[in-house]
Image (cartoon, rainbow, N blue to C red):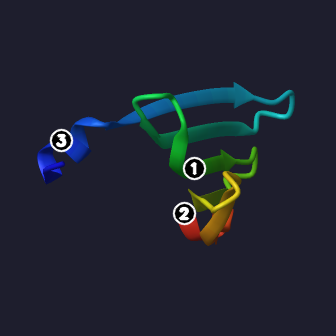
Amino acid sequence: MTDDEAQDDINEVEVVTTAVGDDGTVVVDDVKAIVDDDGNVLATDETIAAEGPDGTIVVDEIISVVDDDGDLVAVEEDVVVVEADETS
């Protein structure tokens, strides 16, 4: 199998979900997944961003890969918090 053929066997799928809470908190969940032609998830990159009513922003990114048992395992997580007074 050539490298080009191997790349044809995997695809990126992205799902973005947005929600607004009763208190005005806005949350965006962006999940990107690498899947094979059979629909099996090989890896994910999920970014969750939330902005509270006071302007505080939290961004959480989790990168996961499939282990030998077929379970997704987080291999990296980064969390950034920007307080409201830092955004102005």
Q: Check disc 1: other Cα within 10 Å, few if <14, some if 14-19, many if 20+.
A: many
User: Label 3 is placed on what type of residue?
Assistant: Glu
The part of the image, by quadrant, that contains residue 29 is: top right
Q: In this rendering, is residue 70 above or below 5?
A: below
Q: Which residue does the image show at 40% across and 29% down from the upper left?
A: 37
**Numbered circles on residues, count:** 3
Where disc 2 sits, the SS reads helix
Taking depth in this image into account, of 69 and 42 the one nearest to the observer is 69
Q: Which residue is mark 2?
A: 87
Taking depth in this image into account, of 68 and 23 the one nearest to the observer is 68
Q: Check disc 3: other Cα within 10 Å, few if <14, some if 14-19, many if 20+.
A: few
3 vs 6, left or right, is: left
The part of the image, by quadrant, that contains residue 87 is: bottom right
Q: In this rendering, is residue 70 above or below 27?
A: below
* Residue 44 in the image, given as x and y percentages of width and height: 53, 50
46 vs 20, left or right, is: left
Where disc 1 sits, the SS reads strand
Q: CA distance from mark 3 to mark 1?
A: 27 Å
Where disc 3 sits, the SS reads helix
The part of the image, by quadrant, that contains residue 24 is: top right
State yes or no: discs 3 and 1 in contact (Cβ < 8 Å).
no
User: Label 1 is placed on what type of residue?
Assistant: Glu
User: Label 2 is placed on what type of residue?
Assistant: Thr
Which of the two discs, 2 and 1, labels the residue nearer the N terminus?
Answer: 1
Q: Which residue is mark 1?
A: 46
- State the residue lying farthest toward the right: 22
Q: CA distance from mark 2 to mark 1?
A: 23 Å
Q: Which residue is mark 3?
A: 5
* Residue 88 in the image, given as x and y percentages of width and height: 52, 62
Q: In this rendering, is residue 13 above or below 71?
A: above
Which of the two discs, 3 and 1, labels the residue nearer the N terminus?
Answer: 3
